[in-house]
Image (tube, grey):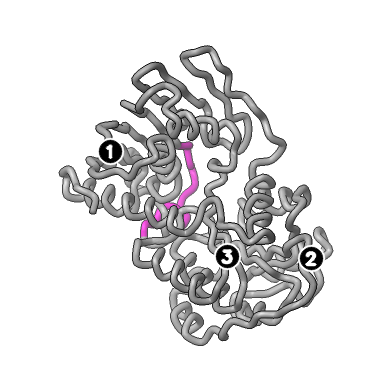
Amino acid sequence: MTKRRTILKHLAVGAAAVAGARLPKFYTGRKKERLGIALVGLGYYSTDLLAPALQLTRHCYLAGIVTGSPEKAERWQKQYKLPERNVYDYDNFDRIADNPDIDVVYVVLPPFMHKEYTVRAARAGKHVWCEKPMAMSVAECQAMIDACRSNKVSLSIGYRMQHEPNTQEIISFGKNKTYGGVKMISVAAGYFDGRKDHWKQKRSMGGGAMFDMGVYPLNATRYVTGEEPIAVLAQERTTRPEIYSEADETTLFQLEFPSGALANCATSLGMSMNYLYVTAEKGWYKLEPFQSYSGIQGSTSRGIMLDREIPNQQTRQMDDDALGILQGTPPMVPGEEGLRDIRVVEAIHRSATEGKRIVID
């Protein structure tokens, strides 16, 4: 059974809920010093990572929750001292438009639900933070961007690694050509998932290795090169077909870039791997691990150690995004960034299905 009690219900009523969402309700008052965040979906990531991180943030705080579980609602209310007015379920979610305590809705749901709740939050006049992967398709991503733009709210995608200092150093190496032009990238992200009958094994819900973990190596190739891939060749592998009959357990893909750089990428829900190696004209640099929740570290061919540690990645990400809203600056990782990755994901899936190299439009 899926951990999300409301998934099947949403498959039936989601479209009607979006159609019936309220028009945006904006309110005025004195400028806030901290933004109120409502977490939508109280699974592992919200429970074990985001909520604790929000106890450490300077520019935002946990103001509300949205859940289909009365038991979770009661537990969270007690633990975080949340008022009853800031606790919602999926049926009364649109009433959040009337709540001045909540400035940002953080969508932490299975990917097939991202578009619906981003659009509904935008129509409610709330800024949106959405977990990766952004959505199921480029069309859904564009609808999310359009909804936020038309309702004059910001949209940020939860790529926490772009807020991480060692990753930012890697990005600067590529941008400034510190080691010359990038020639080759080897990058992989995966873990062994022994669960059965979970939404992550169903591609229709946004499951499979490519959606779940593959966006990490994909996004890394883009921020390392500063380019958009122009072609991909991919293949899928499954060692547990009884579990992964509806989604990829492992995906291998090679990306080509306009500069001539090549990226060999791997992602899996059947094996553990976590590294980013970059070979450039005048040296190399690497991070290993490159996308874990802590302990990001690496080195370069010049003997530079990349080992700056921060207390909490999620705290830094949410503070960065909240400060951007408070100061009226564009988000570090806007919706367009998520869309660009999903465009490539679509090409990867097509390449694996058709067994040939796909040119990315």
How far apart marks 2 and 1 lie (CA) works out to 49 Å
- Could you tell whether 1 is left or right of 340 in the image? right
Task: Judge by depth and name the residue closer to the eye, 276 or 191.
Answer: 276
First in sequence: mark 3 vs mark 1? 3
Look at label 2 and name its amino acid: Gln
Residue bearing mark 2: 77
Marks 2 and 1, the one that precedes in the sequence: 2
The numbered disc on residue 128 is 3
Q: Could you say where residue 206 lies in the image, as x and y percent from the top left?
A: 41, 57
278 lies above or below 102: above
Q: Secondary structure at mark 3?
A: strand
Residues 194 and 353: in front is 353
CA separation, marks 2 and 3? Answer: 22 Å
Residue shown at 39%/61% (left/top)?
136
Q: Which residue is mark 1?
A: 257
- Whole-percent x, y for residue 197 in the image: 45, 55
Amino acid bearing label 3:
Val
> Which disc is residue 290 wearing?
none
Which quarter shows the C terminus? bottom left
Q: Is residue 195 magenta?
A: yes
Q: Amino acid at mark 1?
A: Phe
In-image side of 260 versus 285 (left or right): left
Residue 8 shows up from this direction: no
- Dot placed on the residue nearer the N-terminal end, 2 or 3: 2
Q: Quadrant of residue 11?
A: bottom left
Residues rendered magenta in the picture: 190-203
Which one is nearer the viewer's eye here, 264 or 360? Answer: 360
